[in-house]
Amino acid sequence: MNNRISKTDTLVLKGIGILMIIFHNFFHIMTPLMGENEFEYDKQNLLNFISSFSANPVYSFQYIFSFFGHYGVQFFIFCCVYGLAVVYGNLERDFNVKDFIFSRVRKLYPVFTIAIVLLVLYQYLILDTQITLRTLREIFIRYTLIANWIPGKVFILSGPFWFYSMIIQLYLCFPLLLKINKKSKYGLWVVMFIAYIIILSTNQYFSSLGLSLYCNFIGNLPVFIIGMISALNREWKYPKWIWIASAGVFLIGQFNVYVWNFSQIAFVLMTVPLLVKLYEKFSNSILSKAVIFTGGLSMYLFAVNGFLRMPWVQMSIDTTSKFNSFLYFGAFVVLVFLVALFVRLMEGYCLNLMSKFSFLKKNL
């Protein structure tokens, strides 16, 4: 199997990834609270999932996304670097690192800024939450992208916002990784090996401090690197044994803390080729078109889904009817899509305004 991935394929992966994230962010704070092995491993979380699934298989949709939905983040990491490596990987000369970083920040911050403003307005006007000095301090910490280096601040304001800090850190690594790849055929594999040594030997310690490496660039570097390798070696064939081995590692990783550290990269190697193949087979279906549309909207959906969970989640928890609970979930999903469309519209307005400043024109 060839590993080439088109721009449309990445939209499919992003579409599926963001749906996994939205569903996970809603369901994982609903009862029963199972926990999930996202930033650190706890076997009790797996046992909770198994017991809940066994007791009420009719609610398997909720349980599966609650426990596994966070893996959708890996699609975003993979797709982000895959596109960058395709664009910059074949350049004969080194590109301007300053311009590259500025272009990444410029793409992220308008949406991030709009999302934070909407979050504050939503909490104040809809949820009747008071804006205090602490709120302003947390906005500053989050906005400067340093929250995931401060114990207890990783998930402030809106939990999913941790991703912004992490992805910018990976963007900062990208030019260096590209240079390493040009100097050595196996350079990226060596960096991945070093990253895993650091993760395996120190993540437990950092997790005890409330600073899991998976909240920062180090824990997500292996998936980032595998995305680069896939893009830079576009003629590489993907043998079936890699898929089988990846599926095995992912399964075993749910039961073993050490193997679990490889489950993120195993998930990508297991699902990306499968989903690309499925899209090729059903590319003309309405479902495929809906997923592609969702993928194109994914950046905006990601920005707003976290803080829009309330009061829908609480209403779902309080109701005695599972039917009503899923109605609230449906209303939440519709709201997230509508607000995401509004954010995209606002971004266009902001970019148009920014384009009037001469020093920004070349990066817009």
Image (tube, rainbow, N blue to C red):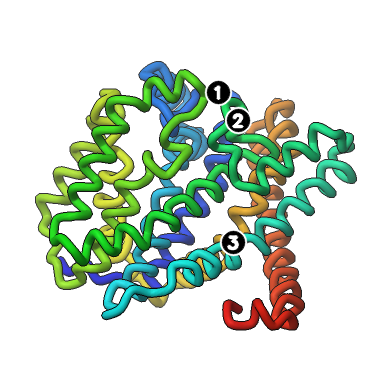
| CA separation in Å, label 2 and label 1 | 6 Å
Q: Residues within 10 Å of mark 2 (few under 14, many from 20)?
A: some
- Helix or strand or loop: what does disc 1 sit on? loop
Which is nearer the N-term, disc 3 or disc 2?
2
- The residue at 61%/35% (across/down) is 155
Which is nearer the N-term, disc 3 or disc 1?
1
The foreground one among 160 and 188 is: 188
The foreground one among 178 and 280 is: 178
- The residue at 36%/57% (across/down) is 78
- The residue at 46%/60% (across/down) is 14
Q: Residues within 10 Å of mark 1 (few under 14, many from 20)?
A: some
Residue position for label 2: 29
Q: Position of residue 349 (x, y in %)?
A: 75, 75
- Which kind of residue does numbered mark 1 sit on? Leu
- Helix or strand or loop: what does disc 2 sit on? loop
Residue position for label 3: 108
- Considering only vertical position in the picture, is 142 above or below 12? above
| CA separation in Å, label 3 and label 1 | 32 Å
- Helix or strand or loop: what does disc 3 sit on? helix
Q: Residues within 10 Å of mark 3 (few under 14, many from 20)?
A: some
Task: Please identify the quarter of the rendering in which residue 326 is found.
Answer: top right
- Which kind of residue does numbered mark 3 sit on? Leu
- Considering only vertical position in the picture, is 269 above or below 44? below
Task: Please identify the quarter of the rendering in which residue 5 is found.
Answer: bottom left
Disc 2 vs disc 1: Cβ atoms closer than 8 Å?
A: yes
Q: Relative to residue 198, is residue 73 drawn left or right? A: right
